[in-house]
Every structure is written in structure tokens, then in C-alpha cells.
Image (cartoon, rainbow, N blue to C red):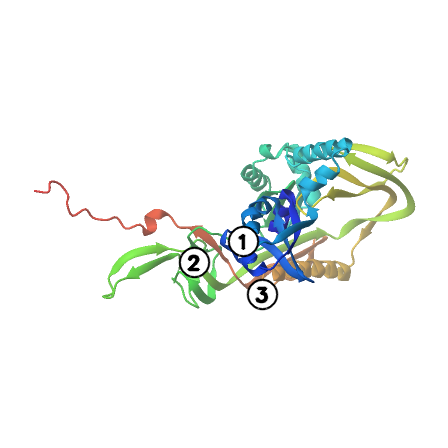
């Protein structure tokens, strides 16, 4: 695919040759490293494709073999430009479009937040906007490490956060503290260490030196598999150490403390059916209402449904379009029955279990109890799990480098 694009940009020819020595012609092309492709026989002729540059090198080969080349078609950008050389407006438009695309590629036009349950993407995007991280900001002004730090400082129950720029998108992934931390990927030589306290359930090591076995109790930060391999000579004497990326399947028995509390009293929104709808477009962060909804409701929800134009999954454009709906509602004060409250708490607990399962966590024991106290529904307890509770730790050079002893210390006399 890449070569096809390169050949199209350079321009290539469809050539037919006729004569008595086609085999010699082809062998000489190969000898002189002249690349031809899609060679086929058509009646008495041979047809192939060749770049413009290599076609000019055929002259001595043609003289030697007596073959007669004939160009039957011309393909590629140089010929396309030549055929359309009088269409100046078209090429000016292409140049302007290319410049605009380049300018747009220097900015962030989409911010996506993934992985949260307690904190919605809208809340985090608003927090970033208050810290001068917004759609339209130049990519060179975005410090992903700084974004990770301010999110951790602001939200104590977000245990892991990752920010990366991909094309014209800023992608932020978060994991709350009551969720397992992703193990991650590394190419640097690393140890495998425990990411939380637990008991080793199983360990299968593919590279590195295992330091624990099934049944061992480990604490957070303990080394499970060393990324340092000891090299021995034929007599079993250590001669060197080699750092590698430790690789193993490790399952740890651990637990999560679960707590979910909500009031038995709640306000229910009852929509009246009255709704006003409008249409809007956003260009370079400037909103333009094609039709603005006009309303005079006392209680209402504003629902915005926008889509961002994009060329690829990572190249978003500064143009959004969508609808804005305003729906009227009335507030009704209600109270859960005991059965309703327990059903709601059970459903939220099930969603939590589903998220654990998505992170390769197996539930061993569910010790969560649901009680009603002081007009509150309280779900709390300990969940015993089997999970891959480990992470990488980069190996320092001082851990494996063996200092060579200089036998000629001092004078050589």
C-alpha cells in the first residue's frame, strides 16, 4: 500500500514491449536493478508498469535486446497535474485546504474521558476547562503529565489517570480507587511488583526470576518477579547479570471495601411533555444557533446532542453540529420503600461487580450487607476477589551492573 502511494506520487507508466528477446530484456532489468511490476503477456507483447525514473534507464537495454517499448498509459500525480494545468483555481483550493488542515492539526479539537463511573466526562471536561485545557488549545501548550497531576490532586478517589494526545484528540483515562489499576505495558527492563496487599493464588513466569510462590502473603510494593537474570558459567559461577522485561501470569487473592449510601427520600422528575427544540453548529468554538429554542419553563432540562466531524478516528475537525432540546418537568417529593431501596442498592452493587469483571477480577466472596438506618440505605462490606494485582517497576542500572575490578591498580612496575 505504501509503495503504491509512493509510485503514484512520483508517477508511473504502463509499457508494452515487442521483440524477439523478452527474457533477456527482463533479466537485464533485474541485473541493473530496474524495478518493474505486474508483468503479463498480452498476445505477442509483454506489458508491465515502471516508474518514470526507471523508464529513462531502459535505453541501453532496449538497444542491446532490440525490444521496442511503447507507453500505453500514464498514471500518477505528475500527469494529473499536467492534464489539469489550466485549472488554477482547483490547485489553489487544494493548497489552501492543505494549509488549513495543517493549521487544524496543531490544535486539540476533541477531549474524551474514559473509565469513570462516579465522575462523568462532562464534570471532568468542565474541570479541565477551568484549568485552561479546552477544545481549540494548541497541542504544544498541553502538558499531559501536568494534567494527570492536577486530576490526582483534585480528586482523591481517582487512583490512576493517563492523558495522551492522539492526532487532534486529548484522551484521558481514569480509574477510581475502588477499581483495579490497569497493569500497563512497558518496553524498558522492569520488575513485577504487587500493586496491593494479598495472597498469591497462582504464578506462571515466562521471563524473569520468580521470587514468590502460591500461598505467599505479599504487601503492596513487594517484588513478585525480578527482571534481572543471573548468567552463570559452566561451573555455576555468576559472571554477569542481564535486565529484561519480567513477564508472568499472576493471580492474587485480595479484597475491596465497598460502600454505597443514599437517602430514602428523593426527588422524581416528571416530564410534562412540553419541549422546545433548536439546532446549532459550533465552528472554531463559536456557537451559531440555526434555530434557538424559546421557552419560559420554571423547571427544565437542557439536552445537547452534538457530533464532531472527523477525517479519521484521531483527526477531529473544529466543527460540531447537533440539536439542543429543552424539556419541562415538575419535581415530586418521593420516598423509597424498603424493597425499592434494597433493589436499587443491589442493582448498583451488580454494576460494580460487572465493572470488576471487565477488569479481569473474579469475585470469590461477597460480604456486602444492605441495611436501612436513619432514613438512609447503606450497602457496605468487604468483597474478596481473585485478580491480577501487579504492576511494573523500572529496573535501575545499579541493580544489575557489576563493577569490574581493576587488577592493575597503581603502577605497573
* Residue 244 x %, y %: 40, 56
Disc 3 versus disc 2: nearer the observer: 2
Q: Is residue 366 left or right of residue 329?
A: left
Residue 69 visible somewhere in the drawing? yes
Cα–Cα gap, marks 2 and 1: 50 Å
237 to 312, vertically: above or below: below
Which residue corresponds to mark 1?
29
**Residue 113, quarter of picture:** top right
401 to 252, vertically: above or below: above
- At 33% from the left edge and 50% from the top edge, which residue is drawn? 399
Q: Secondary structure at mark 1?
A: helix
Q: Is residue 399 left or right of residue 115?
A: left
**Residue 381, quarter of picture:** bottom right
* Residue 256 x %, y %: 56, 58
- At 45% from the left edge and 54% from the top edge, which residue is drawn? 220
Cα–Cα gap, marks 3 and 2: 24 Å
- At 33% from the left edge and 52% from the top edge, which residue is drawn? 400
**Is 92 in front, or is 332?**
92
Q: Secondary structure at mark 3?
A: strand
Category of crowding for the residue at label 3, using alpha-carbon neighbours closer than 10 angstroms: few (below 14), some (14–19), many (at least 20): some
**Is 172 in front, or is 339?**
172
**Contact between labelled residues 1 and 2, with CB atoms less than 8 Å apart:** no
**Is 45 in front, or is 336?**
45
* Residue 398 x %, y %: 33, 47
Category of crowding for the residue at label 2, using alpha-carbon neighbours closer than 10 angstroms: few (below 14), some (14–19), many (at least 20): many
Disc 2 versus disc 1: nearer the observer: 1
Cα–Cα gap, marks 1 and 3: 64 Å
Which residue corresponds to mark 2?
246
**Contact between labelled residues 2 and 3, with CB atoms less than 8 Å apart:** no
Which residue corresponds to mark 3?
362
Amino acid at each position: 500500500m505504501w509503495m503504491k502511494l509512493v509510485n503514484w506520487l512520483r508517477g508511473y507508466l504502463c509499457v508494452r514491449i515487442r521483440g524477439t528477446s523478452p527474457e533477456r530484456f527482463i533479466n537485464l532489468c533485474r541485473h541493473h536493478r530496474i524495478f518493474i511490476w505486474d508483468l503479463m503477456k498480452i498476445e505477442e507483447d509483454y506489458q508491465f508498469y515502471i516508474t518514470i525514473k526507471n523508464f529513462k534507464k531502459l535505453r541501453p537495454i532496449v538497444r542491446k535486446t532490440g525490444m521496442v517499448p511503447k507507453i500505453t498509459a500514464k498514471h500518477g500525480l505528475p500527469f494529473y497535474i499536467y492534464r489539469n494545468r489550466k485549472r488554477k483555481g482547483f490547485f489553489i483550493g487544494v493548497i489552501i485546504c492543505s494549509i488549513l488542515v495543517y493549521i487544524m492539526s496543531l490544535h486539540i479539537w476533541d477531549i474524551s474521558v474514559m473509565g469513570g463511573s462516579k465522575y462523568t466526562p462532562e464534570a471532568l471536561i468542565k474541570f479541565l476547562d477551568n484549568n485552561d485545557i479546552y477544545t481549540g488549545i494548541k497541542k504544544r501548550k498541553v502538558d499531559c503529565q501536568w494534567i494527570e497531576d492536577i486530576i490526582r490532586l483534585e480528586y482523591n478517589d481517582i487512583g490512576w489517570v493517563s492523558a495522551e494526545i492522539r492526532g487532534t484528540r486529548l484522551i484521558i483515562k481514569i480509574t477510581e480507587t475502588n477499581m483495579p489499576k490497569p497493569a500497563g505495558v512497558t518496553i524498558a527492563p522492569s520488575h513485577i511488583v504487587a500493586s496491593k496487599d494479598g495472597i498469591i493464588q497462582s504464578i506462571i513466569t515466562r521471563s524473569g526470576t520468580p521470587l514468590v510462590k502460591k500461598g505467599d502473603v505479599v504487601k503492596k510494593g513487594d517484588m513478585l518477579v525480578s527482571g534481572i537474570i543471573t548468567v552463570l558459567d559452566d561451573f555455576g559461577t555468576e559472571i554477569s547479570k542481564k535486565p529484561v522485561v519480567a513477564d508472568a501470569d499472576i493471580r492474587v487473592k485480595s479484597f475491596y471495601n465497598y460502600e454505597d449510601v443514599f437517602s430514602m427520600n428523593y426527588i422524581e422528575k416528571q416530564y410534562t411533555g412540553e419541549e422546545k427544540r433548536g439546532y446549532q453548529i459550533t465552528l472554531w468554538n463559536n456557537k451559531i444557533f440555526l434555530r434557538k429554542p424559546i421557552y419560559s419553563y420554571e423547571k427544565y432540562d437542557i439536552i445537547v446532542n452534538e457530533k464532531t466531524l472527523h477525517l479519521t478516528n484521531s483527526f477531529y475537525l473544529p466543527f460540531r453540529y447537533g440539536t439542543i432540546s429543552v424539556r419541562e418537568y415538575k419535581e415530586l417529593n418521593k420516598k423509597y420503600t424498603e424493597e425499592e431501596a434494597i433493589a436499587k442498592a443491589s442493582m448498583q452493587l451488580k454494576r460494580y461487580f460487572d465493572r470488576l469483571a471487565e477488569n479481569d477480577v473474579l469475585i470469590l466472596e461477597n460480604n456486602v450487607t444492605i441495611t436501612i438506618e436513619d432514613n438512609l440505605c447503606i450497602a457496605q462490606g468487604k468483597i474478596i476477589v481473585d485478580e491480577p494485582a501487579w504492576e511494573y517497576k523500572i529496573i535501575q542500572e545499579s541493580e544489575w551492573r557489576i563493577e569490574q575490578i581493576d587488577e592493575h591498580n597503581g603502577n605497573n612496575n
